[in-house]
Amino acid sequence: MPCRLEVGDTAGWKPALRRLRRTLFLAALLAGSAAPPCGWNAGAAEGAEAGGRAPRRFGTVHLSDGQILQGTVLLTPGTQFALTQIVLGKKEKADVPFTQLRSFNVDIVKEMAFSPFTRNEELEAERMMQPYKWDRQDRDKRIADGIPYPVRELVCVVKFTSGEEITGIINSTVLYVELREKVQDMPSGTKRFILKSKQTGDPGQKLEDLVYVSRIRMLDEGREIPAKTCLELASKLGPDDIISVMTSDSLEAVPIKPGDKPGRYEVSATLGESVLVGAKKGEKYVAGWPTEGTQKTPLFEEVEKKVMTFRDYYNERKMLGVMSNEDGTRILCLVSLRRRVPANADPTSGEFDADGKKMEFFRLSIWQWKRDVNTKEMLLQRRGSFFRVRVDAEKPTPPAEVAPELWPVVNKNGVLAVGKAAQE
């Protein structure tokens, strides 16, 4: 059996066709350009790929069979690593800042290590799986049927240029290595690897046949990012108010704690991105947003129509604001969301508090769209929430609005100044 670096999913031709249509649609979206009504600068990930060029690093890629490749390391332009952070060992969940999806590129990576790991306590991370069928006479009895095949699950530990380290499960990502010396089987001098959290071999293969990337080590300096950043508000919050911070491009909530004086906070794990700020003031939920982004412009109405017709779990929506990047191809919108339980729903299903009172979910969220300025087609790329709470099903939806005093957020000598502090 020949060695293989990965085994793809074989779910049929329909998923492949959907992926092809999605790729063609994205290609069409990337072709348009126009002047936007208001200026929003996307985060570090977009800036690193200006002009369609992906960040590139010089490093070594180690394989599980002992091979070591050295060359330029990069991802497909327009893509990033996506890692779902997890907790290992006996540490409590509260010991880590959060458990969620983190996005980043090679420009801020120092090292990535992959090793066998599974969250299933009943299975081995590296195992041979035996196909089976159920006994016709005894439906509780399984009978071996077929040739065993290998399965390996992997965990990834990432060290960043900031000194931060996170552990998690990586989404499937294509990694390219442009070798300094051409190899015989690849005249182009470029090797392609699919990094994934689970490998599945063919019947008859062994675990050693599933060669995987075990380590990626960067040999150059990379882009320096701070491990922690100070955030300063010009408009102070009350003692019972709650602040929430989200990265501006990947829309990921990041941990924040009070700083050395009122109005100052310590923000960590932004991975080099700027941030957006939200808050809960009394019973009201607010988010920093430019005032011009709340006006009923053609873009506002275009995005609002898309938001209101989008189908998902939340069936009560209100769009509060919109802003665009410079060419109008990337849109952010601020939305208030609530899940109203249908009147004909089973009264015993849904969410209840400790006293048995019916509850419903509420969110203050930001949606990011990819937009073709010529056809007006929009594709929802990602969503992030400042707040996700349960509210009494019998009570009105909590008020939500924009807060100009929490806008803009500007990096001034290493301090993220918010509102008037950013304009001084």
Image (cartoon, rainbow, N blue to C red):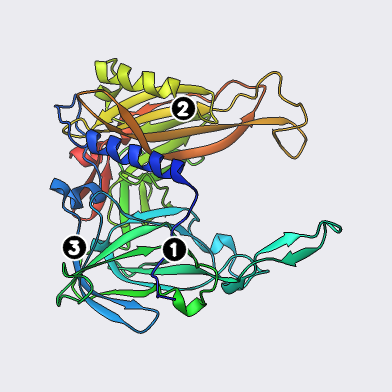
Residue, x 54% and y 73% (percent of image)? 204
Q: Secondary structure at mark 1?
A: loop
Residue, x 59% and y 73% (percent of image)? 128
Is residue 177 positioned above or below 324 on the image? below
Q: Are marks 3 and 2 in contact (CB under 8 Å)?
A: no
According to the picture, the residue beneath numbered tag 2 turns out to be 336
Mark earlier in primary sequence (3, 2): 3
Q: Position of residue 382 (x, y in %)?
A: 38, 40
The residue closer to the viewer here, 68 or 407, is: 68
Measured Cα–Cα span from mark 3 to mark 1: 26 Å
Residue, x 77% and y 36% (percent of image)? 355
Q: Residues within 10 Å of mark 2 (few under 14, many from 20)?
A: many
The residue closer to the viewer here, 204 or 327, is: 204
Q: Which amino acid is tagged 3?
A: Arg
**Residue 29 occupies quadrant:** top left
Q: Position of residue 380 (x, y in %)?
A: 37, 34
According to the picture, the residue beneath numbered tag 1 turns out to be 7
Q: How many marks?
A: 3
The residue closer to the viewer here, 161 or 276, is: 161
Is residue 72 positioned above or below 271 on the image? below
Mark earlier in primary sequence (2, 1): 1
Q: Which amino acid is tagged 1?
A: Val
Q: Secondary structure at mark 3?
A: loop
Q: Which mark is residue 56?
A: 3
